[in-house]
Amino acid sequence: MVPFSVGSVEAQLPTGFEYVILLIIIGILLLFGPQKLPELARGLGRALGEFRRGKMEVERQISEELTTMDVRDTRARVEKAAGALGVPATGRSEMQLKLDIARAVDRASDDQVIGAAQAMGVYSSGSDIQRLKEQIIKALNV
């Protein structure tokens, strides 16, 4: 806004963007009339509410799908690690499988530990076997 003063009172004249907003408001008033304005505002409010609800539903579905994918991915990694350590995976819950892996990792050969670490995604070349065992157990979140 551009300031100007009349006597001791200073007022602000609208600038270009503010003129556009004023013209839109005047256009809406002329187009719909003051009686229809509350009805129009209610409809706009309902539409925005419906949009928000739809957006929240889509976000919920995406979050649910990502959680499902994480669970499947975790189960697959645990089963691969169990296979590398020679632990049978069929008919066991994920928690039972994790406990069996934690027990088996201590008595496993170096090659089995490396295979399990790769399956769990914690393998780094140059790590000693004891460190890999610790990382496997930490990754199990038992």
Image (cartoon, helix red, strand yellow):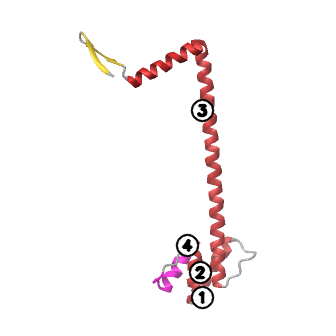
Specify the farthest residue to the bottom. Answer: 109
Residue in front for this viewpoint, 95 or 33: 33
Q: Mark 2 or mark 4, which is nearer to you?
A: 2
Specify the farthest residue to the left. Answer: 8
Could you give the CA–CA distance between mark 4 and mark 3, rounded to whole angstroms? 44 Å
Q: Earlier in the sequence, mark 2 or mark 4?
A: 2
Identity, as a three-letter code, of the amino acid under mark 3: Leu
Q: Of the numbered discs in the image, which one, if any, rests on residue 108?
A: 1
Q: Rate crowding at label 2 as few (under 14), some (14 to 19) or many (20 or more) other CA atoms within 10 Å.
A: many
Q: Of the numbered discs in the image, which one, if any, rests on residue 48?
A: 3
Q: Position of residue 111 (x, y in %)?
A: 57, 88
Q: Mark 2 or mark 1, which is nearer to you?
A: 2
Could you give the CA–CA distance between mark 2 and mark 1, rounded to whole angstroms? 10 Å
Residue in front for this viewpoint, 132 or 5: 5
Q: How many marks?
A: 4
Q: Which residue is mark 2?
A: 116
Label 1: element kind: loop
Identity, as a three-letter code, of the amino acid under mark 1: Ala
Could you give the CA–CA distance between mark 3 and mark 1, rounded to whole angstroms? 60 Å
Q: Is residue 2 left or right of residue 102?
A: left
Q: Do the numbered discs 4 and 3 sit on residues whose CB atoms are within 8 Å?
A: no
* Above or below 107: residue 98: above
Q: Rate crowding at label 4 as few (under 14), some (14 to 19) or many (20 or more) other CA atoms within 10 Å.
A: some
Q: Position of residue 139 (x, y in %)?
A: 55, 72
Residue drawn 33% across the image and 22% down it: 1
